[in-house]
């Protein structure tokens, strides 16, 4: 059994996708596939052959190192994005390799920056909360901060939550419904908030509009720096990153429904204690406990025996989720057991 301190060092694996991404962006050619092959290939295999690490030991009395891991993701994300932009500008990445690099960088942003952003936006510390919003900005996401905190955690498992996948809904249909629903919902929520607080509905006060404005500035800057190709590549990276975000939403609550009048329990989230999902994704897979205590730091989350368990982790389930018939065959037989 892992001790709490030894377990904490394993969270450093969460930085590994950024290293493969950086290597690929600065090397070009086939190397630009490095992080894609690592994250969706190698890590997926590890998920299927590894055994669960179900220890509930934590280091709540010594949170410095787990917090340091999260903070390290900030420079790693900036370097990864910077290498992507630099690689295109310096023509290290050309032709089809721009596309492969955009996918690779998008996977890193989706599996690293957005995951850590999720952790930060639940923190009460104003600066850490800001860092979460900054990481979401680096992913081109304008809605998650608003919808996740104000809607998802309140209405998960119900028809009011866009981020809960319905039984029989494909990943692709869910991506469109969830992303558009959350985006439009976030605009509405911000409109209502400003009206309630008697604030003017202007760009600087409205979270979604402010993000759109800042991204317009960024996109314009990228255009003058690297032209339309760089802007298109940046958009492609953002689409991949947010597709991964919605993929995670898809598998976390697929087919798990509840009545609006009942509280969220450990039965309303799919859990996994496999190595990759725990340590590369900083215990994002201990999702049931997160919905019990949303502000609980990732390294103190525990597993519940009664929580439904995914047959593999997030990396291992991606290809299956991308092929709806296989996904339905695997998951629907597990739903009646809940």
Image (tube, rainbow, N blue to C red):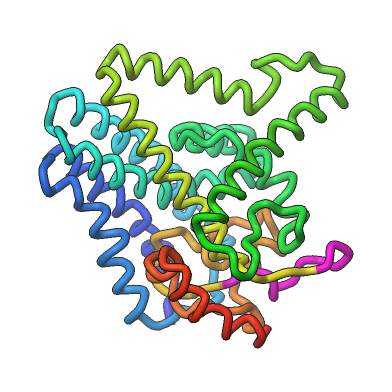
Residue 288 image offset from top left, x and y in percent? 64, 68
Residue 303 image offset from top left, x and y in percent? 59, 75
Quadrant location, the N terminus: bottom left
164 vs 17, left or right, is right
Residue 26 image offset from top left, x and y in percent? 15, 37
Q: Is residue 180 visible?
A: yes
Quadrant location, the C terminus: bottom right
Kindly indicate the quadrant of the structure image that contains residue 219: top left
* Vertical comparison of 282 with 262: above or below: above
335 and 51: which one is in front? 335
* Vertical comparison of 183 with 59: above or below: above
* Vertical comparison of 14 with 128: above or below: below
| Residue at image location 26% in from the left, 34% down from the top | 84
| Residue at image location 29% in from the left, 35% down from the top | 79
Q: Is residue 265 magenta?
A: yes
Magenta stretch, residue numbers: 259-270
Q: Is residue 59 visible?
A: no
Q: Is residue 330 magenta?
A: no
| Residue at image location 83% in from the left, 67% down from the top | 259
* Vertical comparison of 109 with 4: above or below: above
94 and 252: which one is in front? 94
The number of discs equals 0
| Residue at image location 58% in from the left, 84% down from the top | 334
Residue 223 image offset from top left, x and y in percent? 32, 16
307 vs 38, left or right, is right
90 and 22: which one is in front? 90
Q: Main secondary structure of the magenta part?
A: loop
């Amino acid at each position: 059994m892992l001790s709490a301190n030894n377990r904490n060092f394993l969270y450093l694996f969460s930085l590994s996708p950024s290293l493969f991404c950086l290597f690929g962006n600065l090397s070009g050619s086939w190397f630009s596939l490095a992080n894609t092959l690592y994250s969706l290939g190698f890590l997926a295999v590890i998920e299927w052959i590894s055994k669960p690490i179900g220890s509930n030991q934590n280091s709540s009395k010594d949170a410095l190192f787990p917090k340091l891991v999260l903070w390290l993701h900030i420079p790693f994300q900036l370097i990864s994005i910077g290498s992507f932009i630099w690689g295109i500008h310096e023509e290290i990445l050309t032709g089809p390799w721009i596309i492969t690099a955009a996918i690779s960088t998008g996977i890193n942003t989706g599996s690293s920056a957005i995951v850590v952003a999720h952790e930060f936006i639940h923190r009460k510390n104003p600066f850490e909360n800001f860092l979460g919003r900054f990481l979401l900005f680096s992913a081109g996401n304008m809605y998650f901060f608003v919808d996740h905190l104000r809607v998802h955690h309140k209405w998960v498992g119900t028809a009011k939550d866009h981020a809960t996948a319905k039984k029989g809904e494909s990943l692709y249909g869910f991506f469109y419904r969830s992303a558009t629903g959350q985006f439009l919902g976030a605009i509405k929520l911000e409109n209502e908030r400003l009206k309630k607080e008697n604030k003017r509905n202007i760009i600087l006060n409205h979270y979604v509009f402010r993000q759109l404005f800042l991204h317009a500035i960024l996109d314009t800057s990228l255009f003058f720096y690297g032209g339309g190709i760089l802007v298109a590549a940046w958009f492609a990276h953002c689409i991949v990153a947010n597709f991964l975000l919605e993929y995670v939403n898809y598998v976390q609550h697929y087919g798990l429904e509840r009545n609006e009048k009942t509280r969220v329990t450990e039965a309303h989230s799919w859990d996994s204690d496999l190595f990759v999902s725990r340590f590369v994704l900083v215990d994002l897979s201990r999702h049931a406990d997160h919905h019990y205590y949303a502000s609980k730091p990732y390294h103190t989350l525990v597993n519940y025996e009664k929580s439904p368990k995914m047959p593999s982790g997030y990396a291992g389930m991606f290809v299956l989720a991308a092929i709806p018939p296989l996904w339905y065959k695997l998951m629907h037989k597990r739903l009646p057991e809940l």
